[in-house]
Image: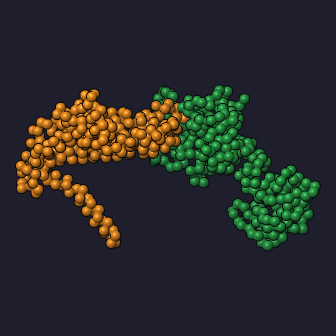
Chain colours: A green, B orange
Amino acid sequence: MSYLELSGLQKRYRDAVAVDDVSLSVEKGEAVALLGPSGCGKTTTLRMLAGLVDPDRGAIRLDGAEVTRLPAHKRNMGYVFQSYALFPHLSVARNVGFGLEERRVAKAEIARRVVEALAMVRLSGLDQRRPRELSGGQQQRVALARSLVIRPSVLLLDESLSNLDAKLRDTMRHEIRSIQRSLGITTLFVTHDQVEALTMCDRIAVMHRGRIAQIGSPEDIYERPATRFVAEFVGRANALPATRDAEGRVVLWGERLPVAAPAGGEFDLFVRPQRIRILPISEPVADGMARVTGKVLRSVFVGDHVEVLVEGAAGQIQVELQSGTALPQEGAEVALVWRARDTLPFPRETA
Amino acid sequence: MNGAGRVLSSLAGLVYALILAPIAIVVALAFSADNFILFPPSGYSLRWFRALGAHGPLLSALWLSVQIASVVTVLSLVIGVPAALALAKGRFSGRDALTNFFLAPLLLPTLITGLALLLFFTPLRLTATLPGLVLGHMTVTVPFVIRMMTTAFSTLPDDIEAAAATLGAEPWRVVRRVTLPLVTPGLIACACLCFLLSFDETVISLFLSGPRAATLPVEMVRYVEGRTDPLVAALSVVLIVATLIVVIIVERLVGIARAVGK
């Protein structure tokens, strides 16, 4: 049995189902991201873990013991709120020491551990400040130190980086990841930011409409999305309406691709823009490659890459090229080539 | 300034003048040297303040009112603050109905409350007693405290209390260490207003007062029924000054509490 087990968690609010059926196993020391759009139930799941929301159904087991109905103050889980939720009337040191004071830890040890925790988040010397005297990034560090100093059995982070500017977010991402690793603390992140999920976690659980759509390593999620939703939500992808021929092969823009068509009704092919290469139309195609032809509509320079839009017989395909490579002429007839195994067919959504 | 602005300013000035003019007249009368209420006074003196210092019934009524208002304030906070906390933060069925129920007395004319209390208290021998007056005033102040503190508690972000809970604080420790310190400014303001409400309460007191126990407003009403000298004007000035001092103290305290709090 895993260190942390969520089984069949469900939470309803009057007429809406926030969390429908979430089961998840987390190993000790593992970092797992709950990734999904707003309203997918990821924060509610995290709050149920912390004991801030009572689940309607399901169970939570921590280290073999059931904690489903245990009140928040007995769970020993560190929770970093999106708003940080620092105590405005207490100094930084008292904020960080709060959990230790509640645990009746001796004064001298509290002082020692607070200093230690503040050093870990690189806030030494700010212990007498009030939260409102700190920048957003510093407040975030205080919140992190405050939940780490109690040596929680699980660390829960709720959209913790979303209030920071882009540069600071990058720094904090790496800092939190390295703290998490060095302490070996079991961590659950809630985020809607895929970069955060992909870079900070061992595994990602993509949530959709109150359920886990897919769980796996960042590579799994990115390379082998299990559902159309995951393919659309994580990374960017061309969704190309395709048909099947009499032999069950995929036909796109009038060209047969070496890809088996899925059974059933209408479907789209998902191809990541950076997996597609642009070749001269005369270039022969190797085995196991998919190839269609089209006309270059425009190229846009985006700094680290170039986006090229190609129009074909039945739609457009976006291609992402590394900047520095030769750009195709606008209006040129080109061949688009990608590996057949980078083609992911998903049924068309009827909704 | 444009035309509309000028009209608005003069209108505001007029309203202020109308509100403040009677108070100015009272202040002028308090320093009158006349035997009767006469405006403007023919001369100025401090004789009515001296007369007030020697007036037994009014002074004992003042003392009674201070006692009642103090007890009412303490009891109203003791009852109202936990109720407000439950109504603002608790999750139980019938909460909205209960909130409205507690606020209903604020909508009822005090005339009706006073009459009802009189009918209810008479067989219990509570009229014209300190407990009776305290209970009577509390029918106004407790709903007031509940209303004011419910608002104060509701505006606190839930996450701050949730954070304290995840850090291991039991519910009562969360209230003591986080919730109450954060609403201290509101609490002080609420206590002061509660005191003033009780101190100023006239209608219910009129029903519940008797020869044995009369609050200051009741005694003042009785006084002006029989006499027409400027003594009550002098008393009014004393009350205005006392109120101003309280307001200034509150402003300072609340200001400091805010500075400490946020």
> Residue A335 lies in what quarter of the image?
bottom right
Residue A97: image x %, image y %? 49, 34
Say which of A38 and B259 sits in front.
A38
Residue A157 placement, left or right of B103: right
Above/below status of A278 relative to A217: below
Residue A35 placement, left or right of A99: right
Residue B169: image x %, image y %? 50, 32
Above/below status of A300 relative to B50: below
Q: Residue at x 58, y 29 (%)?
A: A70
> Residue A299 lies in what quarter of the image?
bottom right
Residue B226 placement, left or right of B131: left
Q: Residue at x 56, y 33 (%)?
A: A72
Residue B244: image x %, image y %? 24, 47
Q: Quadrant of the N terminus of chain A?
A: top right
Q: Residue at x 80, y 59 (%)?
A: A241
User: Is residue A50 shown to the viewer in this render?
Assistant: no
Above/below status of A312 relative to A340: below
